[in-house]
Amino acid sequence: MRQLLGIARSLLRGGGRRTLLDLALTVFGVAIPVAVTFLVLGTIAGFSDREDRTAWREPTEASTGEATALQRLVYHPWQGKRVDVVELREIAPGTPPPPGMDRMPGPGEIWVSPALAGALGGDTRRFEERLGGEIAGMLGAPALAHEADLVAVVGNPALEPSGERLPFDHRVMGGFVSSDVIPVAGFATEGSDPGLPADYRLAALVAGALLVAPSMTLVGAAVRLTAARRGRRLAALRLAGATAGEVRVIAAVETLVGAVAGLVLGWGLSVVGAMLASRVSLAGGRFDWSDLLARPVAVAAVVLVALLIALLSSMIALRDVAASPLGVVRQTRGRRPGWMRVLVMLGAFALLFASIPLARGTGAGWVMVPGIAAIILSIATVGPLFTWALGRIGVAVARGPRSLMAGRRLMSDPGGSFRPTAGIVLISFVAGFILVGMASMPDTEGDRPTYIYGATVGQVPVEEEVVDALVSIPGIEIDEDAGSVRLPVGTDLEEGRDLLAGVIGALPITAEEMDHDLRVFAADLRKGTGVVVLIALVQAAFATGVGAAGSILEQSNTLAALNLAGTPMGALQSARALQAAAPITLASGVMVFLGVLAGGATILGATSRVSPVVPALAQAGLVVMGAVAAGLLGTALTRPVLAQVIARPLAER
């Protein structure tokens, strides 16, 4: 084994600039996808930690005879936002205080978060009157999900246990439906919220499937990009007498060196990414950058999976070395991809559509994530077949040497031709998926507040005479069919609320506040879309550059031979551009369509409050144009690598 390790080290040290270039391509090809994976997993863990920090607000029923307090979670509107108000009444000594407090609140005492205190400003008294008390303290960080969290704790001596319990979890209704009054003996330290946080969990899981699945695919692609040249070197060792097992060990060592370096670099990039992502506000507030770091268990799992994928990809790429080393030296090609690959993608879509009824029936949106991930992984399977078919068509309709050369290259090595464009093709799918989500989200903003007088804090019934009383208010507009009222432009939101409360008998909720969950989620989805697309574009840019450079190295003998036969540099570069642009153009269009289809299916399974909307054709066209531009840019930037390859005589290879 020591001798084999010594040979591997000699090959790495004595390979010159070409070996360093191969190693650099592998390192960066592994680092970027791994960094994205770490960041996605860290974000999912960050949302989970937030739920644990807010679990104490929801009453946890105590066993009979153990209750020491009564608790209810209600919601109050304030300046278009929703405030979580935890009402408590101590019924026996010994109740531990809520997180962020050093004691239980006394009757009429209100404890507020720093963000809420800032939002109240000089209007504190109005808020105190609504809650029936006075502000007596400030909540500490353990009580808050984030620094912008709006939450209050109030001692309410009038609380009494609810008689008839709600037949559903109030949190799934959204809006301002309060919980029952529950006897408690303490406060939860962990839990999952089926309301708005569940939407964010699903969004994070979907984003993970959209980014992590292609990331793991690109790890394998990065390793295989440089396998051709290493294959020729190892084939020479095989012909010199090395056994198949010895060659595999040497190949594994070379692969592990690049993969481990890529993992270390990827971890560093994920830390930088977490610092940048922490500047974006999600679910009402920003994360601390440390909250977005992947947990140790997740890091260990990613490292293990990435190394296994790298080793497996290397073994697959170099399998001919052990079986037929002479064939590797001669650079013989295998058979074209089979049409059975299409069944893989059809099966992936079938898995997604089959999970829709289960997701709608159980409310567990995560059951659709495996289907989404399967579709993304199937793209790598179908891609080479699509590339070969495109090359066949290109050869049939070719009218010049450049298009004929590009078509032949696509047919002779469909897998190698697809790998440089795989990142962009995957991004086209992600973009199509996101476009349908963006188009389906409603715009809930209005030019002035619309109060719904039938929806109030406390759900006080509205009598017919209330409408007559509302009509007497100067400048008011009433829509009796919608049960809503609008005050004159310029009316302060809270002053108008108190004015209407004097007539209705309870605080009315605005239309925007009623759709609080959807409004916040839609706004965050738009911001999150930008983050996901930015990450995906960076990943695609690196994947394209690494893929284009690796493709040149893999086809170095062929390109050099064509140049020696009289093919000018410009013709080779044009053929490479066409070889990249042709599959990108058609594949991006197809993948945008498939992304829209998968995105629509996910919306159908995730919620009944939003219907899928087909995005504008112009948006899809921009995605395809951007994909083609990225592919051509990657080809242009790797022109110096092509010049270096064809300048080196074949005798030196």
Image (spheres, grey):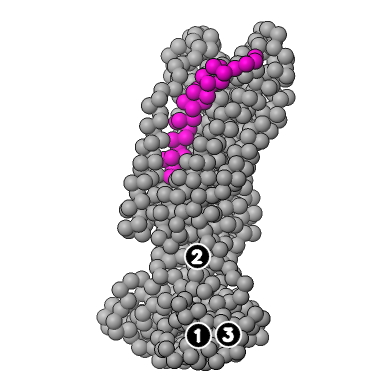
x, y percent for residue 171: 41, 70
Please tell me which residue lies in front, 405 or 504: 504
Left or right side of 430 for 567: right
The answer to if 594 sits in the magenta stretch is no
Identify the residue at image location x=48%, y=90%: 468
Q: Is residue 622 above or below residue 44?
A: above
- Amino acid type of disc 3? Ile
Q: In this view, does 391 lie above or below 531?
A: above
Give the magenta range: 372-401
Circle nearer the viewer, 3 or 1: 3
Around disc 3, counting alpha carbons within 10 Å, would you say few (fewer than 14), some (14 to 19), or many (20 or more)? few
Of the image marks 3 and 1, the number of the one nearer the N terminus: 3
- Amino acid type of disc 1? Leu
- According to the image, label 2 marks what residue? 518
Q: Is residue 515 above or below residue 111?
A: above
x, y percent for residue 336: 45, 19
The secondary structure type at the circle numbered 1 is: loop
The secondary structure type at the circle numbered 3 is: loop
Of the image marks 3 and 2, the number of the one nearer the N terminus: 3
Identify the residue at image location x=48%, y=20%: 318
The answer to if 377 sits in the magenta stretch is yes
Q: Which mark is residue 507?
A: 1
Q: Which mark is residue 476?
A: 3
Identify the residue at image location x=45%, y=11%: 324
x, y percent for residue 239: 50, 8
Left or right side of 178 for 153: right
Of the image marks 2 and 1, the number of the one nearer the N terminus: 1
- Amino acid type of disc 2? Leu
